[in-house]
Amino acid sequence: MKLNYKIPKYLKDAYNKELGLYEVALANSDFTNAWYHLERSHIIGQSYPIEHTYSHWLMLKFGLMQKNTKEVFGQIIRLIVGGWKSFINHIPIGNTGGANVPPLKRMPIPNDIKNLFNSK
């Protein structure tokens, strides 16, 4: 069994880029793009416990800010189980992480992220 504990630098850089774009969009009250970049950070970081958990933490905070009770509840559940599933490499690849999709549903990976994953 492969254990994931540290994200490779090339993925960490892409993950951090998405979080930076999230922060810019959030600062500009562009909530649609802010959420889009949170979802992308989740896809990139979901195989690594720290990044996966942090993406869900930000999604929880976003849900609270938007007063979206479905998102808040969904993120609390995901925070409880997501990190350890990453650690044992048992995650639904491509899942965007929001409460609007089932937590175990595999989803298509955007081509640019797929290329990033295939680059190493």
Image (spheres, grey):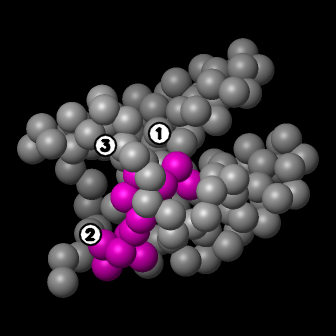
Q: Position of residue 23 (x, y in %)?
A: 60, 28
Looking at the image, do the residues carrying marks 3 and 2 touch, with CB atoms under 8 Å apart?
A: no
The boundaries of the magenta stretch are 85-97
Residue for badge 2? 4
Q: Is 13 situated above or below 99?
A: above
Residue for badge 1? 40
Q: Amino acid at mark 2?
A: Asn
Q: Secondary structure at mark 2?
A: loop
- Residue 77 in which image quadrant: bottom right
Quick one: label 1, few (<14), some, or many (20+) residues within 10 Å? many
In the picture, the quarter occupied by the C terminus is: top left
Residue at 72% over, 20% down: 30
Question: As rendered, which of 115 and 5 lies closer to the eye?
Answer: 115
- Residue 103 in which image quadrant: bottom right
Quick one: label 3, few (<14), some, or many (20+) residues within 10 Å? some
Q: Amino acid at mark 3?
A: Lys
Residue for badge 3? 12
